[in-house]
Amino acid sequence: MSGAGKMDLPRIARSVEEADPSAIPVLVHARRVDAFEVDFQALSFVVEEPLPAVDRAVLGLTLALGRLGPHDVRCYLGLGHVVSELMLLRLSREGLLLDQSAGDEDAEAVEAEAVERLPTSARTIERLPPDVAHTYVLTDMGREALARDARRMFRLRSCRLILWAEPLHFIGVAREPARMKKRSAPARSKPLSPELVPKSLVSIDDLMALNASEREQLSGLGEKLPGVEGRLLGCAPDSQWEVRVADKEPNSLLVFAGYPVPEGLEWRVFVGSPWSLSACPRWLLMASHAPEELLAPEFVDEAVDGLGLERAWDVKVGGQEAVPVLAEGAELLRMLGDTDRPMDSWAPLQGTRGGGWASAVRVRALPGSPASAHRALLEFVCRREVALLHDLEAVVGATWEKLGRYWGGRDFPTPSREWLLLELWSRQAMRGVVCQARLRHDLVDPYTGTGEAA
Amino acid sequence: MRRRGNEQIEIGSQRLEDFYFLEKPEPFPDWVGKATTVAPVEWRSTTHLFTDDLTRTPHVRDALLELIRGAREKLFFCSFIFAEDEIVKALCEAAERLHGGVYVLTALEKEMQPDMSDLGEEISEYIRKREERRKHHDENLGLLARAGVWLRSSKECHAKFCVRDDEEAVVTSANATQQAYFGNPENGLRLREPWVARELGRLFAHVWLHEASAESQPGAELHVHSRTRENTPWRPLRRETGLWPVCTLGQHEHSIRERTLALIGTARRELVMASYSAVGLKGHAVGQALRRAMVERGVRVLLVVRSRNLSEDQRKTCAWLFEGLHPNQWCLRAHPLTHAKAIVADGERALVWTGNLDGHHGYEAGIEVGIETDQPPLAGTIREYVTALAARSSQVGEPYPTLTEVAATEVKSRVTGEWVLRLPEALAQQVPDLPQRLSRRLVGHFRLNKQWIIRVGPDLHLRASRDDKARVIILESVWNAPFLHERSLDGFFGGCTVEIVHLPPEFRAAHPQEGQGRRRKRRQRHR
């Protein structure tokens, strides 16, 4: 289990919001998990291929005649004797046809005994007596292939999968750098000796033996592997695998996000990198053995206390998706973000909890005093310079209202126009706004009374 | 040294067409009276200001600084150029103090080219000085923008005035430059009549709001962007007795022209005038009115302009204006640096304005501002100033002088003494009467792309080179290009004796024939 290291928790929290935009979390816990590269010598896949025309013809003929032999293939399709026989043999090996002479022990063969030869008006190319001793009938697989115009092929491939051991979870498929020559390929470390291989990976063949849905539930390893053609069936019998530590695996982040619900917090699990997370089944929550105190609803209050922030108990923010806290001056501005509207911020908790968990709580910064509120207004107003040049009063009014709503209706006195203009003037880049605000007074109003349409 | 068989001609004794300004002491005609020492005089609420170029006392600048520093609410300032640090500093301080409210009309970026008329330097210095001044101007604009001054620019605006709080104003001929405030003769009026200031403020607001084509809003840096002009109705400036503002405002108002015509048309005895230039008047109503006043009513005229012998337009305008009049009826003086502008009729009525006696600009088009007065004390003060300026102007307008006389006035122009002129055979055949032309017509010179060009008469241009040590001029070829006629001369040939040495036919000019160089270069490139 790796430590938390230096984690950009606000970034991780934003990735959580992007991965699941349906709700807003109030708390996130994240930790890095050790990842392993497991090189399988042979994984079995089933691949669907288009049915070749000649196969489709033979299967179609079988369907029409009910049962057929090499003579039928030769008479109706005009293939040579040897080819006809080999064709039927191959289709039988692929499971699309059933050789009736294979033996009575085969249940399907017994059933096929009942298949009668059907009459047909199709003309033959040459006349030969129908085969009696060596006939074939369509299997269910053959019927399906004919209906879908595709056949299933089984392939064995060597694959390198990236997996977490604890909890056991499939991360992805490792790729060799494209067209890289062997001598220029990066050197790999030695495989882990058996005693160092995590327990869950020692018995990975058990996992591979399960059917796809069970396997996916337990490890996230489903039928489809990204970038690999076909559906994964499992490990090829008697094949080997070796395990290495994946040093630079970016997608080794496990994140629990707590969403406020009436009963407390609802937890959702995400896996991936700080920049891109994807939702995962909840079983990972249990499998990761996260400390219980991290998942308790009271942790939010403890976290806020730990941050040294004063909680604004009297303020209710919509949905309680953020914890209202009081802040002043520069800290307030930092917590409100640098966009054109106030945003909740993620306050990371110092240090890590048991198991290397790092946590961050979503806070909503409220001004502790009218002066701070006015400073925040000035800051947000300055971010809309173009609109300010157009209509100072409207922008200030709308921004003040927006901030008021964001602060849960907290009531502060409106700053005076004079104060605002003075503050704007003190910022050199905003002087144009002040000049624009007085333009009418200086250049238009004094002269309109004298009759000029200014 | 004369060589046997070579032709020798005299250059310089030929009389030239038009008027030229010559350095020569000449007393005023009696009717002008005696010039007295003048000082800014206050009449009721108005002061006639001027830059005293003798004592280098910047009365105009001091008045402007007082206005700027005294602004309590807002300040309007219009100057084509800002190259005077004290004014810029005062404007910055005013903007800081008032938290905005300082509005400036000036030249922004490329619009700075047209008016550099108060430079007062020789042409060769012109380009370098212009670039220096442009840089200084741009730096000052940056300072103004950062201090919170709102800058706008109108290409047509040549007016120079300042209005404080709609209470007080200065209208002046001076741009905001060191040269204008300390070196040039400049004048103006300081007006403490609130209604006049208010009218000038209205004019400024109209130009600033509706006629400006570029602007830089106050901010962290100078950022010029273009803006759309609006065609907005304009109510003409109010007129009252005593003192009233006039202007030229594009197509909206031409009261400067109207009042100039009225002043000239009602003059009974005399017109005393100062202007940077007198050009384009022949076909213009103002010129026609002046000529009529002199010819039909016998009005006497004193005119002080800047000496610009190289300006053909001014030479021809003056020649036309005073042609056939008795020498005692007119007095034309030129000052090398004057930029003052005023017209005084009979010592009783006067107009001080920012334009010039220019038929091309300022009467029908452009933006100019002026103040007219019908109060004799004020008009008398202005007359005294123009007369004193005329007395300090050592150059006198002279019709049809010799080339030698003109060359003696122009500092840079003299090619005098004995020279050898090498004339290639081909050129001699192409212009067979070249010696006659050289001895009878105006002979001047200018440089174009490092090539020395001699102009003979109005239309012959010769490529030439000059060896001052050996006193040899080598003529190379005739150059016929349509744009050459528009080029101003750098100077004239003075009185000189020229020995023409015919070069043999095999002589080839160092300079390639027109077009060949370019073709040769192209061929080399292909290789």
Image (tube, rainbow, N blue to C red):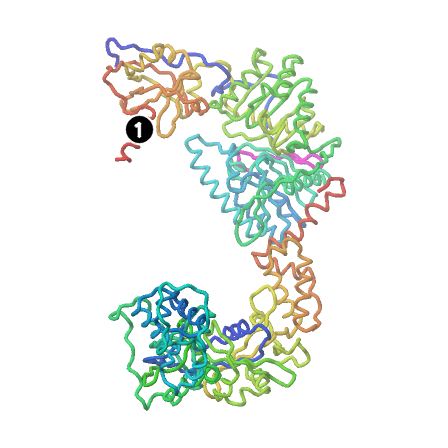
Question: In the rendered view, does A64 fall on the left or right side of B362?
Answer: left
* Number of numbered discs overlaid on the protein picture: 1
Magenta stretch: dominant secondary structure = strand
| Residue B86 percent across, percent down from the top left | 54, 45
Amino acid marked by disc 1? Gly
In the image, which residues are magenta? B40-57
Indicate the secondary structure of the residue bearing disc 1.
helix
Q: Name the residue under label 1.
A: B517
Image quadrant assignment for residue B451: top left
| Residue A277 percent across, percent down from the top left | 49, 74
| Residue B123 percent across, percent down from the top left | 44, 30
Image quadrant assignment for residue A129: bottom left
* Chain that bears disc 1: B
Q: In this view, does B218 lie above or below A285?
A: above
Give the class, few, some or many, for how many residues have Cα within 10 Å of label 1's Cα (few <14, many ≥20).
Answer: few
Quadrant of the rendering where the C terminus of chain B is positioned: top left
Answer whether residue A263 is magenta in the image: no
Q: In front: B124, or B516? A: B516
